[in-house]
Image: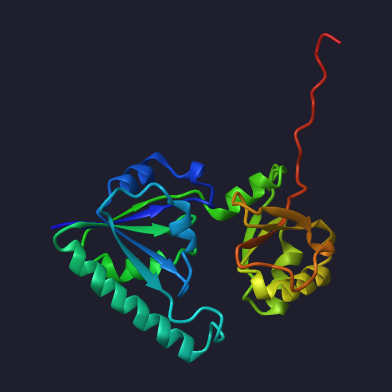
Amino acid sequence: MGQIICAGLGPGDPDLISVGADRAIRGARHVAFFRKPGRQGQARRIVQGMLPAGCTEYPMEYPVTTELPFDSPAYNDLLSAFYDDWAGRLAALAATDEVVVLCEGDPFLYGSFMHLYVRLKDRVPVRVIPGTPGMVGCWNASGTPITWGDDVLTVLMGTLPEADLARHMSACDAMVVMKTGRNLPKVRRALAAAGRLDDAWLVERGTMPGQRIARLAEVEGADCPYFAIVLVHGQGRRPVAVPDAAE
């Protein structure tokens, strides 16, 4: 019997792939990855030049991305059937061979692989190789520590209702807002309502080619790609230089 290995790829820069994931990818005979129809796929781009000769590729093309509201019954039905179908295909492959599934960031932090994992874990052996979360790459790219001292870090989804976003934003120290994209205008309004807009930064394509870091207040509301995160750095207890006792 084979197995399924999910390789966390990190935030986008191939140099940030772990040694374990690199080893699994370079030795793979079967590799599956998510992508939009007609696109190369971000995960596939990250491993360009790493796959061995003869490796069979399985692009798992989403049936829907932003065409329908993410909380609509039609959206959920389409994606559920998609994950059911691919779980069956991967389980059949893993019955006799090893299959590597690529996942951006860390597979267990809002990763698409989680939807396959819950369908596969009781059917075939599954091993998950952790990856550096995309948000970690983004806040390091910003050049400023995300938290200090006793700061509480809050991770929010831009898909949340605007009132919920503003409520969470007003109560936290440091924050990361994921799934911005077309939700950016709503995120901006919520930050303004919480009095945090002037402290917010937009990191686009963090650690990837075309990376851009800008103050959110200075970015046009609709000017935001899918791979973008909003950061608000904590302002808690900072390290203070201690005078030399001999002075």
Instruction: Determine whether 242 is above or below 126 in the image.
Output: above
Task: State the residue at coordinates (66%, 80%).
Answer: 161
In-image side of 146 versus 81 (left or right): right
Q: Position of residue 82 (x, y in %)?
A: 36, 79
Instruction: Please say whether residue 123 is visible from this viewpoint.
Output: no
Task: State the residue at coordinates (78%, 72%).
Answer: 221
Q: Position of residue 74 (x, y in %)?
A: 46, 91
Of the 4 image quadrants, the one containing the N terminus is bottom left
Place residue 163 in its image quadrant.
bottom right
Instruction: Please say whether residue 99 is visible from this viewpoint.
Output: yes
Q: Position of residue 41 (x, y in %)?
A: 47, 64
In-image side of 194 versus 211 (left or right): right
Q: Position of residue 186 (x, y in %)?
A: 73, 76
Task: State the residue at coordinates (53%, 84%).
Answer: 71
In-image side of 86 versus 217 (left or right): left
Instruction: Determine whether 69 is above or below 223 in the image.
Output: below
In-image side of 48 versus 143 (left or right): left
**How was the colour assigned to the protein in this rendering?**
rainbow
Which sits in the foreground, 42 or 199? 42
Of the 4 image quadrants, the one containing the C terminus is top right
Which sits in the foreground, 223 or 138? 223
Task: State the residue at coordinates (74%, 69%).
Answer: 223
Q: Residue furthest top?
A: 246
